[in-house]
Image (cartoon, rainbow, N blue to C red):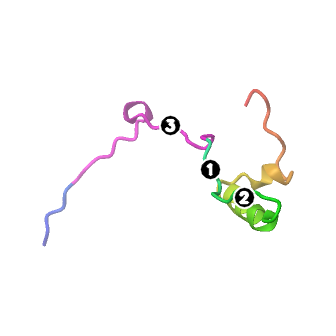
Amino acid sequence: MAASSLSTVNTNQTEIRAFRTENVPVQVTTLRLTKDNYFPWSAAMTMGIAGRGRIAYIDGRNPEPAKTS
């Protein structure tokens, strides 16, 4: 049998320089909107925004966050 080893993981965010990244701007799709590709572009954007859990803000199901939030 292999010997088991015990290790600890540092979860102190100030020590490991971990930051929340939910508001970091990212490219949602590489598809550039043109007058001929609205439907594929729209589907790609919807999937990208929904994948980040933000589609409810776009379609109005969630209210706009407070300015002080």
Q: Residue at x 63, y 40 (%)?
A: 23
Which residue is most to the front?
35
Q: Quadrant of residue 10?
A: top left
Amino acid type of the residue tagged 1 in the rendering: Gln
Q: Residue 24 at what x, y percent from top left?
A: 60, 40
Residue nearest the observer in this picture, 31 or 62:
31
Lower position in the chain sequence, tag 3 or tag 1: 3
Q: Are marks 2 and 1 in contact (CB under 8 Å)?
A: no
The numbered mark at residue 42 is: none
The amino acid sitting under disc 2 is Met
| Image: magenta residue range | 6-24
Which residue is denoted by mark 2 in the rendering?
45
Q: What kind of element bears circle 2?
A: helix
What amino acid is labelled 3 in the image? Phe
Q: Nearer the viewer, mark 3 or mark 2?
A: 2
Q: Is residue 26 left or right of residue 6?
A: right
**Residue drawn 55% across and 39% down?**
20
Relative to 45, does residue 63 appear above or below in the rendering?
Answer: above
Q: Position of residue 29 (x, y in %)?
A: 65, 57
Magenta-drawn stretch contains 55: no
